[in-house]
Amino acid sequence: MSTPLGMLLLRCNEHGLTEVGFAAGGAVPRRPTDPLLLETMLQLEAYFAGATADFSNLPLAPAGTPFQHRVWSALRAIPPGATRRYGDIATDIGTAARAVGGACRSNPLLLVVPCHRVIARTGSGGFMGAANGPWPQRKQHLLDHERRFFAA
C-alpha cells in the first residue's frame, strides 16, 4: 500500500494483523486479497485522508513478549494528535523509560499501535528502530497529520 510516507507492508495470520511496516525500497504495490488486509488497507487509506484514526476494530496478533504487549496496549490508549513521554508510560506500567523505548522499537504494527505518539523527555526522539527510512521525519509527519485532522 502506498502512502505519503512510503510503501506500507501489511501481513496477517489466522489470528489477526501481525505487521504494518514500511517496505524496503523497490517494493511493488499489490492490492491485498485477504479480507483483514483489505480492511486494514481501507482504514489506513481513511487515516491518511483525515477521515479516521481509529483502528480498534482490527484484530491484532503481533509477536512479542508479555511486557511488549503491555507497552503496546498503553500506546493504543494515546489519543490521535496527542503525545506521551517514554517516562510517563514507564511510570504508568511500573518500568523504566528505556524499556518502553525498546518495546516501541520492537513494535511490528506501526500506525495501528501508535509508537509515533511517544516522545522523549526533551520533546523529541524515537522511531529509530527500523533499518530503512527517514524515521524522525516520518514520526513528525504523522504527528502533524494527526494534529491537523484528529486533535481534540
Image: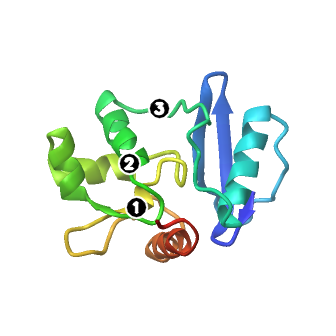
Nearer to us in this view, 149 or 18: 149
Residue 127, x across and y down, in percent: 40, 63
Q: Secondary structure at mark 3?
A: loop
Residue at coordinates 61% horizontally, 29% vertically from top-left? 16
Q: Residue at x 67, y 57 (%)?
A: 8
Q: How much space separates mark 2 and mark 3, taking CA atoms?
A: 16 Å
The alpha-carbon separation of the residues under discs 1 and 3 comes to 21 Å
Which mark, by number, is residue 75?
Answer: 2
Please name the colour scheme applied to the rendered image: rainbow
Which of these two is toward me, 105 or 54?
54
Amino acid found under the numbered disc labelled 1: Arg
Give the label, 1 or 3, closer to the camera: 1
Whether residue 18 is situated above or below residue 9 in the rendered picture:
above
Query: What's the CA distance linking mark 2 and mark 1?
Result: 8 Å
Which sits earlier in the primary sequence, circle 2 or circle 3?
3
Mark 2 touches mark 1? (CB < 8 Å)? yes
Which residue is denoted by mark 1 in the rendering? 117
Element under disc 2: helix
Q: Which residue is mark 3?
A: 63
Q: Are marks 1 and 3 in contact (CB under 8 Å)?
A: no
- Mark closest to the chain's N terminus, 1 or 3: 3
Decide if residue 25 is in sight here: no
**On the rendered structure, is 150 left or right of 38?**
left
